[in-house]
Image (tube, rainbow, N blue to C red):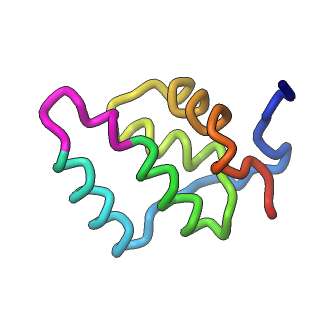
Amino acid sequence: MSVRRLHSVQPDSFAFNAENLAWAKQTIAKYPAGKQASAVIPLLWRAQEQNGGHMTEPMIRVIAEMLGMSPIRVLEIATFYTMFNLKPV
């Protein structure tokens, strides 16, 4: 199995646009208290779509903060699933 890493060039920040932020909050609210981390894959997918098709480190940090997770846990998920592109396509 090959090692999957984020692209070496990273932006300074990431923020969901207003529409995606509202969607993210609704998605997180679907999960019971204490289980919001289960929304990590839908949020990563939406963030990747917003970003033009690939993941970034600031994006991972924003999602981790929204879900009360450690950024390394979100990075583990993003690097495990090949549906998440770690470099610009």
Residue at the spot 25% in from the left edge and 48% down from the top edge:
28
Quarter of the image where the C terminus is located: bottom right
Taking 71 as reference, is 39 left or right? left
Quarter of the image where the N terminus is located: top right
Residue at the spot 70% in from the left edge and 55% down from the top edge:
11
Q: Residue furthest left?
A: 33
Q: Residue furthest front?
A: 1
In the rendering, at what x and y percent does residue 13 appear?
59, 54
Q: Residue furthest bottom?
A: 19
Q: Is residue 62 above or below residue 67?
A: below
In the rendering, at what x and y percent does residue 36 appear?
26, 36
Residue at the spot 27% in from the left edge and 66% down from the top edge:
22
In the rendering, at what x and y percent does residue 9 appear?
83, 50
Taking 41 as reference, is 13 left or right? right
Span colored in magenta: 31-39
Q: Is residue 89 above or below residue 69?
A: below
Judging depth in this view, the residue of 78 and 2 nearest the camera is: 2
Q: Is residue 38 magenta?
A: yes
Q: Is residue 27 magenta?
A: no
Q: Count the labels in the image.
A: 0
Residue at the spot 17% in from the left edge and 49% down from the top edge:
29
